[in-house]
């Protein structure tokens, strides 16, 4: 998959990067400015977005020439864009919003990823601020989802498991959190802990599909 190298190093969010590339590949001009005035303010010297695409080396080991796409200033509902040609292109101003411009949007933010139909058991623990804990367990059988010790709505459990099958964070709050940070955010202990398990393996133990811990909801 995709990796981020700067400003931090680590796994990238494949979905966001693929969407970026798709939106660029389908970017089409509404109009052109074939002979731009050299003195005209285009905003390209301080672009709103500047993307450089570099392909893999070919069989001869030589890398293809990079492709650069630069979004400049907005003028009359259009935004000037420079691509591979010397002409300037105009695209609808709102097209810029198709491209995330926050670093966190391109970082790996999946908290869980599994196939929802693989889930056979889910364990919930609710913990009050006073430290009192309540546990509920869900089991999936021939008749659907059941709960213990409290009865549950099977449809709501199924939706919970489906929502957690690919839960993605909107942002990264802290790179590293110590116990003091976790306590401040209501994560030590967590207010809610959800653990989803799959079918039992050959050793009789169920595989763990995902675990999510939720803090205070401020």
Image (cartoon, helix red, strand yellow):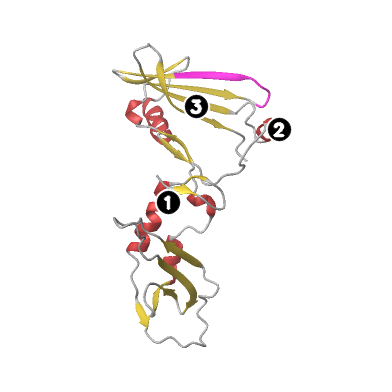
Looking at the image, residue 174 sits to the left or right of residue 115; the answer is: right
Where does the image place residue 142, in percent across and percent down from the top left? 28, 18
> Can residue 75 be found in the magenta stretch?
no
Question: Disc 1 or disc 3, which is closer to the eye?
Answer: 1
Query: Which residue has dot 3 on it?
Result: 194
Q: For this rendering, which residue is in front, 180 or 164?
A: 180
Q: Write the residue at 48% across / 66% down.
A: 50
Q: Write the residue at 47% across / 14% down.
A: 149
Q: For this rendering, which residue is in front, 18 or 159?
A: 18
Q: Label 2, secondary structure: give it.
A: helix
Query: Which residue has dot 1 on it?
Result: 16
Q: Quadrant of the N terminus?
A: top left
Query: Which residue has dot 2 on it?
Result: 180
Q: Which region of the structure is painted magenta?
A: 129-137
Q: Write the residue at 40% across / 17% down.
A: 206
Which is more N-terminal, label 3 or label 1?
1
Residue occupying the far right of the picture:
180
Mark 1 crowd level (few <14, some 14–19, many ≥20, 10 Å Cα)? some
Looking at the image, residue 59 sits to the left or right of residue 210; the answer is: left
**In the picture shown, does residue 190 fall above or below 19?**
above
Which is more N-terminal, label 3 or label 2?
2
Q: Which mark is residue 168?
A: none
């Amino acid at each position: 998959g995709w990796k981020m190298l700067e400003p931090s190093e680590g796994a990238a969010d494949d979905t966001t990067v693929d969407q970026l590339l798709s939106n660029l590949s389908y970017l089409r001009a509404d109009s052109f400015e074939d002979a731009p005035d050299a003195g005209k303010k285009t905003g390209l010297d301080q672009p709103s977005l500047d993307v450089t695409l570099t392909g893999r080396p070919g069989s001869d080991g030589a890398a293809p020439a990079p492709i650069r796409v630069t979004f400049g200033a907005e003028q009359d509902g259009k935004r000037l864009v420079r691509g591979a040609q010397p002409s300037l292109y105009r695209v609808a101003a709102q097209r810029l919003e198709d491209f995330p411009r926050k670093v966190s949007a391109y970082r790996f933010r999946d908290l869980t990823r599994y196939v929802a139909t693989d889930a056979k058991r889910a364990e919930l623990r609710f913990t009050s601020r006073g430290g009192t804990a309540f546990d509920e367990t869900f089991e999936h059988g021939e008749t659907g989802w059941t709960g213990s010790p409290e009865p549950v709505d099977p449809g709501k459990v199924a939706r919970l498991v489906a929502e957690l099958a690919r839960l993605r964070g909107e942002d990264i709050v802290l790179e590293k959190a110590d116990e003091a940070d976790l306590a401040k955010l209501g994560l030590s202990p967590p207010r809610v802990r959800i653990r989803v398990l799959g079918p039992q393996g050959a050793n009789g133990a169920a595989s763990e599909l995902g675990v999510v811990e939720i803090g205070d909801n401020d």
